[in-house]
């Protein structure tokens, strides 16, 4: 099954249809690396199928306008983040309030989201980073600078499952709200392949401006 979601079409309809007084909220969803290299119905040898469409549907059922696509193979993280920044800037210029925009990323998508936070540099935007931080990132990705309302979700049994508090402390942009949630599903990195309520519920609350998780 070859499915390609065209972000340009979704985005164009959103950017021209909404004005300053609307109550619509937007989620940019950035998926993991596995889906860059495989079709939507292909199985990861350890974690099974990545439930991309089901995850998007959960956000839609919660009332969000979802902007997403299945990325091409081996996209550059920084270049793709700049592309998302351009789309966010267009929404902001059309009158959408920054508090109504949330960028959610899992695994590699979480790293893209961190660079979006850095490049947009808007403390009123919301971000959810899922399974996308390791201690070595402080040295290897030293140019990331958190900005916005940041929720970091990680899994205890995942190699990417550590706190990003050190990054938060060293970021010099205003971070109005910062929260971390450690899960213990026993699923390793596979937890973010599935539409688990353990990470979807706090993500949706965060995107709705409920920062008291």
Image (cartoon, grey):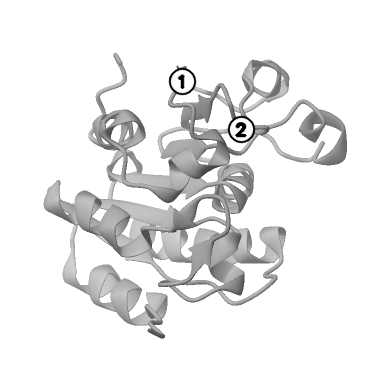
Q: Is residue 49 left or right of residue 202?
A: right
Q: Quadrant of residue 2?
A: bottom left
Judge whether 48 appears above or below 199 on screen: below
What mark, if any, has residue 125 been given in the picture?
A: none
Coordinates of residue 10 in the picture (x, y in percent): 30, 75
Q: Residue furthest bottom?
A: 2
Please give the name of the residue rendered at 48% of the width and 71% of the height, measured from the top-left corner.
42
Q: Residues within 10 Å of mark 2 (few under 14, many from 20)?
A: many
Residue 95 appears in view: no
Please give the name of the residue rendered at 61% of the width and 39% of the height, measured from the top-left corner.
132
Coordinates of residue 189 in the picture (x, y in percent): 56, 40
What mark, if any, has residue 184 been given in the picture?
A: 1
In the picture, which quadrant includes the N terminus?
Answer: bottom left
In the image, 189 versus 82, the foreground residue is 189
Circle 2 sits on which residue? 146
Q: Residue furthest front?
A: 45
Please give the name of the residue rendered at 49% of the width and 64% of the height, measured from the top-left corner.
43
Q: Secondary structure at mark 1?
A: loop
In the picture, which quadrant includes the C terminus?
Answer: top left
């Amino acid at each position: 099954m070859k499915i390609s979601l065209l972000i340009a079409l979704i985005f164009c309809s959103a950017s021209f249809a909404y004005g300053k007084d609307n109550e619509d909220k937007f989620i940019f969803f950035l998926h993991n690396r596995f889906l860059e290299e495989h079709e939507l119905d292909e199985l990861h040898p350890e974690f099974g199928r990545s439930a991309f469409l089901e995850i998007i549907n959960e956000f839609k059922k919660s009332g969000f306008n979802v902007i997403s696509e299945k990325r091409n193979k081996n996209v550059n993280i920084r270049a793709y983040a700049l592309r998302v920044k351009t789309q966010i800037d267009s929404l902001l210029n059309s009158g959408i309030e920054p508090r109504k925009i949330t960028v959610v990323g899992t695994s590699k998508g979480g790293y893209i989201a961190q660079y979006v936070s850095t490049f947009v540099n808007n403390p009123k935007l919301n971000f959810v980073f899922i399974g996308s931080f390791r201690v070595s990132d402080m040295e290897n990705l030293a140019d990331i600078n958190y900005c916005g309302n940041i929720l970091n979700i990680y899994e205890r049994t995942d190699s990417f499952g550590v706190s990003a508090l050190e990054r938060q402390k060293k970021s010099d942009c205003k971070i109005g709200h910062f929260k971390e949630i450690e899960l213990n599903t026993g699923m390793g990195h596979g937890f973010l392949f599935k539409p688990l309520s353990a990470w979807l519920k706090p993500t949706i609350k965060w995107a709705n401006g409920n920062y008291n998780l």
